[in-house]
Amino acid sequence: MRIVIEEPMHNEGRGGVSVYTRSLLSRLAVLAPEDEFVLFSYFFRERERRTARLRPGPGERWTNWTPRVPESLVSRLEWDWGLAPTGRYLRARGGDLFHTQRTPRVKLLPTVVTIHDLFPAVHPEWVSPFTYEQCERILRPGMERVDRVIAVSAHTKQDIVERWGVAPERVTVIHEGVDRGVFHPSTPERIAQVRAAHALPARFVLMVGPFDPWCDPGAVLEAASRLPASLKDVGIVFAGNPGSVGEAVRRRAAELGLTERCRWPGFVPHSDLVAFYGAADALVYPSLYEGFGLPILEAMACGTPVITSDRSSMPEVAGDAAILVDPTDSEAVRAALVAVLDDGGKRADLRERGLARAAQFTWEEAARRTLAVYDSLLGR
């Protein structure tokens, strides 16, 4: 069978959707050597640079289909005119199954969709009117046309069922994984190298972006400003895209007298991020809403204690291996920081619990369960 998996064009290989696509694809190709796997995406500008990151690496097995067509044109044809250029293209090239991450307007092949979250439907106040309209006019009605639905967490499934009225038996929960070949405890030498290269503080808590209204570090800054004198040397490192609230966070840090304790390295490649996790006293991940929350597992796999939110999918992912707090309560965040930063025994306990928890989430298991969804749809 020829199984086509779509990588949305707007992804640049850095976000969770890109991690999901490539991680799943590489494992599926190993589990089902009798099948042919295709990575599909539209491109128009910068085609060579964009397609280069989609090519299989050493030991990976898939084919790329990257038609040079403006995705905006395809979207207009599909969503506004009800035509099916994507389906016709895939069917003409012998596709047997289409696995997408957005619901189709017109379906010509057996189709599986992965839903990562229902952010625009749950929090329309944090997205543009255009994004909300796309969600309600395109994605929601498209759920009726797909054959199988994969949700990356039980919380996302609950949102799909309750907010979009999808029958629960149509939705399969398949957790994402963490790549233990990438995310693992770093050596002291590697940590020292990265610490020097990025001028990281001797002690710090790590936050990973993008920083947007649903993952606003404001409460963390307030908490850090009220740490006891013995912990006033602990810094805060903001790794990743500054997002829509980055400048506001910088201003608030200055108002609280925290500028000298903050670092803003911007986007950090995985090769360095692993050592960032290893150098940090804790990851603080105070998101109000996530479909899954992959940084929680990445940090745990690196042996880093985690303080995260008690909202949406975070408790499901973290289990009993993290400290859960109300992300809007700066006093609760402060107490959690003190508990981790002031107690070596607590850090060691969270480290061991986290390593064990992360080991339960593998891309191999995600691929095995995804392949079972394909098999059920293809009747094999």
Image (cartoon, rainbow, N blue to C red):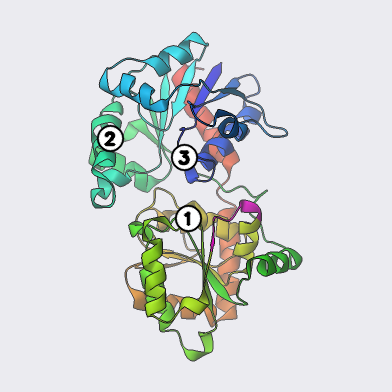
Relative to residue 264, is residue 155 drawn left or right?
left
**How far is disc 2 from disc 3 in space, using C-alphas?**
25 Å
Q: Along the line of sight, which residue is nearer the eye, 169 or 244?
A: 244
> Does label 2 or label 3 sit earlier along the sequence?
2
In the rendered structure, which segment of residues is drawn in magenta? 265-271
Q: How many marks?
A: 3
- Which residue is rendered at x = 54% and y = 79% of the image? 234
Residue picked out by circle 3:
174
Residue 134 is tagged as: 2
Q: Is residue 239 magenta?
A: no
> Does label 3 or label 1 sit earlier along the sequence?
3
Q: Along the line of sight, which residue is nearer the eye, 45 or 126?
A: 45
Relative to residue 175, is residue 251 drawn left or right?
left
**Residue 332: quarter of image:** bottom left
User: In the figure, 81 relative to 343: above or below?
Assistant: above
- Which residue is rendered at x = 24% and y = 48% of the image? 124
Amino acid type, residue under disc 1 in the picture: Asn
Q: Which percent across, then down, holds residue 206?
A: 52, 67
Q: Which percent across, then down, holds residue 362?
A: 58, 45
Residue 164 is tagged as: none
Q: Quadrant of the N terminus?
A: top right
Residue 241 is tagged as: 1
- Which residue is rendered at x = 61% and y = 66% of the image? 352
